[in-house]
Image (tube, rainbow, N blue to C red):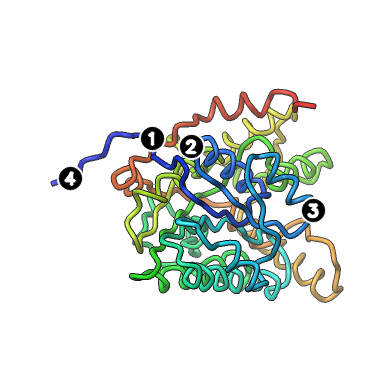
Amino acid sequence: MARAHPAPTKVDLVDAPIFVTGGTGFLGRNLVRDLRAQGADVRGLAWTDDCQRALAADGARSVRGSLDHWASLIEGLRGSEFVVHAAGHMRVWGNLKDFRRVNVEGTRNVLEACRRAGVRRLVHVSAAAVVMGEAPAVGVDETAPRHYPGYSAYIRTKSEAEDLVLAANGRDLETVIVRPPGIWGAGDPYFLPKIASAVRDGKFRWIDQGEYPFSTCHVRNVCEGVRLALTRGRAGEVYFVADPATLTFRELLTGLLGAAGIQTPTASIPFRRAWRMAQACETIWTLGRLRSEPPLTRSLLKLTGQAFCVSDVKARADLGYRGQTSRDAGLLEMSRPAAT
């Protein structure tokens, strides 16, 4: 018999003490605002004065410290019932050691601090990319194996972090993982600006015309999934969350560029050719010890250049997740001039 879908209800987080890591990033600031709107008592980890000011502006109290600093983590987590671990190092190029320090060792430190501080539940924001294998994939669910590719420090370390989070689930600490695919929305500081810059410079090329299905998750839909996972997720489980409508990558990017007033490019190259070009770029950057980011990497190609669609049926059944922010609403928001 099919599992009944619970009716979507507002999760009661009024006065709930919640600690957020990564609360000053693109996703993190949206999470802090969302949780504050639910009436939660939110504290966030801040490692600079600017981070403290950002948390205060979003209605959260700040705890000075970092993922590397044990004492600040434990002290900051004391009294928190829930922790949302949203901090992460997301780039398509870089030293594996830097990714491991934040994504793996940082997660290990947060988990241990949760146990020592008596936190009841941790929701870890991972990435759908952890199940990206060699071949394009459509309809992927949570039973798919994680991958640890050598060409992508980001995917590899996010998978390693999931190993730690799932192993930590137990009587003294409940852990739940939320996996969004490509996060988008107003205020994105990395993905869209990077592509928009390449388009303006005439360096952007579609991969296979961009005509492949591609899952996304608006930043507010990610917040919805995290909020539900805090109180309705089953301990030790993993949940994909995604936008209700699946688009082709070309449809997605055409909409995003259009919202920014940028004309859609037309040039395209095949995936296999792009992969060889990416390998060549990486070799040049590695041998030359160049500090900049290559214009094309295999990690970027894997994350954006092939069919990849996830199924969020489990989140809809267990959590009552709906993905309430539509593509049209998200694009309309992005097309409006930024407030001054």
Residue located 33% across and 40% down the image: 320
Is disc 2 placed on a helix, strand or loop? Answer: loop
Residue located 29% across and 44% down the image: 317
Quarter of the picture containing the C terminus is: top right
Q: CA distance from mark 4 to mark 3?
A: 51 Å
Q: Which residue is mark 3?
A: 49
Q: Which residue is mark 4?
A: 2
Residue type at the position of mark 1? Lys
Image position of 136 with respect to 329: above or below: below
Q: CA distance from mark 4 to mark 1?
A: 24 Å
Q: CA distance from mark 4 to mark 2?
A: 31 Å
Mark 2 touches mark 3? (CB < 8 Å): no
Image position of 39 with respect to 125: above or below: above
Residue 198 appears in which quarter of the rendering? top right
Please tell me which of labels 1 and 2 falls first in the chain: 1
Q: CA distance from mark 2 to mark 3?
A: 26 Å
Image position of 43 with respect to 58: above or below: below
Q: Nearer the viewer, residue 296 or 324?
A: 324
Q: Which residue is mark 2?
A: 38
Looking at the image, residue 123 sits to the left or right of residue 103; the answer is left
Residue 59 drawn at (x, y percent): 63, 40
Is disc 3 placed on a helix, strand or loop? Answer: helix
